[in-house]
Amino acid sequence: MSSASEDHKQFADFARRLAEAARRETLPRFRAGAAVVNKAGAEFDPVTDADREAERVIADMVARAYPDHSFIGEEFGERIGAAPFRWIVDPVDGTRAFVCGAATWTTLVALERDGAPVLGIIDQPYTDEYWIGVDGDAQFTRAGKTIEARTSGLADISKARISTTDPRTDIYLKGEEADAFARLAAATRIARFSLDAYAYGLLAIGELDIVAETSLQVYDYAALRPVVEGAGGVVSNWRGDPVGTDDRGEVLAAATPELHRAAVEILSLRR
């Protein structure tokens, strides 16, 4: 095993401990009447103590273990370090689901090295499920039982199961994006909504086939690529370019290259 892989194994173990520490903050507050604050003014963008306290704990653990690493979280911004590593955290991805008592929110933990993804974790504490992708492999654990994570392998878009967080126009999908997603969804067999990052976990174990979203920030998507790609899927923006290279926050994940090409072709008709 290379020294880089050894490093990544060490980081993966640490990332799992970060997710476990976040669970101790989020689980006691879930379905327990957590106070909700709107952090976006006129546009409702909820945050709870679960988000904030989970991020505080994770940020503190990273600062103590790797003081020269950079760190960015959704709630408290970025700390710049001298090392080539950056931890990226969304303590509660899907806060709307959290405050509605729906067990589709997750904690996302990612690590980049020189801007390239090294590992990603998608953790759903209430159902006791987590996904980890590192060094081109992905695993899924539920209730202590771990298996290899693999996508469905589907190539036929007419049989695909698709998801996006919110299909309402002028909320996440705006203008031509909404039209493009409607065309893509119409080409598939089943569409399900409001799953947030949990949808990418389902894609990585063959339960969904396509996820298409926009308006995402780096802490929303950094952990997703190592998991989905490690499970055999493809992740890009809607043009087929690397995630993060557009100003729309687009993410398109698909179970296979064939399905991905078909989705990009449909989405590209909007331009």
Image: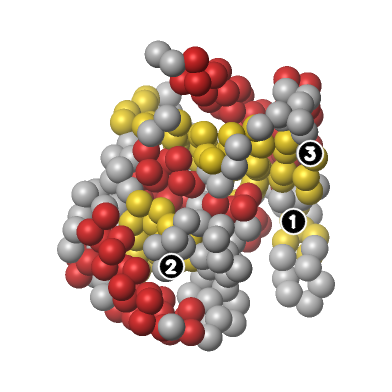
Residue 76, given in percent of the width and then of the height, sits at: 80, 47
User: Badge 2, how many Cα within 10 Å: few under 14, some, many 20+?
Assistant: many
Badge 3 element: loop
Residue 195 is situated, as x and y percent measured from the top left of the image, at: 48, 58
Q: Quadrant of the C terminus?
A: bottom left
Mark 3 lies on residue: 80
Q: Nearer the viewer, mark 1 or mark 3?
A: 3
- On residue 11, the disc is none
From this view, report whether residue 193 is shown above or below residue 78: below
Residues packed near mark 3 inside 10 Å, few (<14), some (14 to 19) or many (20 plus): few
Q: In the figure, residue 60 lies in which quadrant?
A: top right
| 164 with respect to 10 (left or right) | left
Q: Nearer the viewer, residue 68 or 228?
A: 68
Q: Which residue is mark 1?
A: 47
Considering only vertical position in the picture, is 248 above or below 22?
below
Label 1 close to label 2 by CB (< 8 Å): no
Q: Dot 2: what SS?
A: loop
Q: In whole angstroms, how far apart are the C-alphas of marks 1 and 3? A: 24 Å
**Horizontal placement of 251 versus 56: left or right?**
left
Marks 2,3: beta carbons within 8 A: no
Counting residues from the start of the chain, the first of labels 2 and 3 encountered is 3
Query: Tag 2 or tag 1, which sits nearer the N-term?
Result: 1
Residue 189 horizontal/vertical position (percent): 24, 70
Residue, x 78% and y 39% (percent of image)? 80
Under tag 1, what secondary structure?
Answer: strand
Which residue in the protein does label 2 denote?
A: 238
- Whichever of labels 1 and 3 marks the residue nearer the N terminus, that label is 1
The answer to whether 218 appears left or right of 133 in the picture is right
- The type of residue carrying mark 3 is Ile
